[in-house]
Image (cartoon, rainbow, N blue to C red):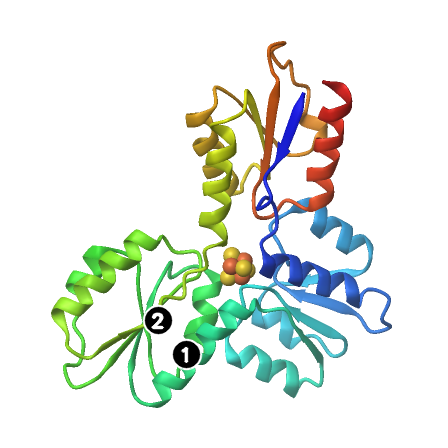
Amino acid sequence: MEVIVAKKSGFCFGVKRAVEKVYEQIGSKSPIYTYGPIIHNEEVVNDLAEKGVRVIEGEDALSQVTEGTIIIRSHGVEKRIYDMIEKQGLECVDATCPFVKRIHKIVSDESEKGKQIIIVGNPGHPEVEGIKGWCHNTPNVIETVQEAENFEADEEKQICIVSQTTFNYKKFEDIVEIFKKKYYNVIVANTICNATEERQAEAREIASSVDAMIVIGGKHSSNTRKLYEICSRECEHTYYIQTLDDLHLELPKSIRMLGITAGASTPNNIIEEVQNYVRINF
Ligand code: F3S
């Protein structure tokens, strides 16, 4: 049986980099903390906990820390969190994804020039919270076309629109269109990262050419569920598993080609384990 593993499965560049930065810190003498779980994957977070890495949940908890290293995860944080870390005399390891950092710089520069910042994204998402915290004036978060229609800006001000990195491109375009129709002074920075879209496109392509498809990822991972949906549409025998332990597959005998993909928070070693298992057992 031939096995095809999606090249763009599992961690994206920014998450991979952040997880590696945490592992690099292990062994240093001072206590190590991540500001929020470094990734939404229980196995990784538990493994790090066993190695002494603790998770800080929020500013109150951070204010209690008196020594050690704080690692900022790929989503990034508000500027005031860096200020707190510095003021408390803590070490900071910044694992913010460079694509998110770029947004921080844009909103900081443009708001300093007096522009009205519009962040297209989910207002509850930590990445959006972080971006808001780099603006020198009050930004607005817009998530829907309806909100864009209802938005009333100061006509005198120039508008600068950025996007949450994982926002849907089509929706972003629709929202930008509304702003452009309503106002003259609009500059747009498309800051959407295409890692998610590329992962989905590759999964779709593989699923359409194989006899069975395995999708690996956490059961609460929305991007894995989306991958499963996409693959199921293309391939009748699509299986959703979390780890190798779930792989009690009764694969149909006729299977000649099998595809594997994984959600954004699935570590490489799990993908490899699954891949080796199916190569040996089927
Ligand atoms: Fe990942 Fe960075 Fe894009 S964290 S999804 S590579 S913005």
Q: Quadrant of the C terminus?
A: top right
Query: Residue at coordinates 49% horizontally, 63% vertically from top-left?
Result: 126
Q: Are marks 1 and 2 in contact (CB under 8 Å)?
A: yes
Where does the image place residue 148, in percent across and percent down from the top left? 21, 62
Q: Amino acid at mark 2?
A: Ala
Image coordinates for residue 96, horizontal then vertical, percent: 58, 69
Which disc is residue 39 wearing? none
- x%, y% of residue 192? 41, 61
Q: CA distance from mark 1 to mark 2?
A: 8 Å
Residue at label 2? 189
In the rendered image, the vertical position of residue 108 relative to residue 199, given as above or below = below
Residue occupied by mark 1: 106
Left or right of 40: which side holds 115?
A: left
Q: Residues within 10 Å of mark 2 (few under 14, many from 20)?
A: few
Q: Residue at x 29, y 53 (%)?
A: 171
Q: Is residue 222 visible?
A: no
Label 1 Cα neighbours within 10 Å, binned few <14 / some 14-19 / many ≥20: many
Q: Which three-letter amino acid code belongs to the residue tagged 1? A: Ile
Q: Is residue 132 left or right of residue 218?
A: left
- Total tally of numbered discs in the picture: 2
Residue 184 rendering spot, x and y as whole percentages: 15, 77
Q: Secondary structure at mark 2?
A: loop
Residue positioned 65% across, 57% down in the render = 16
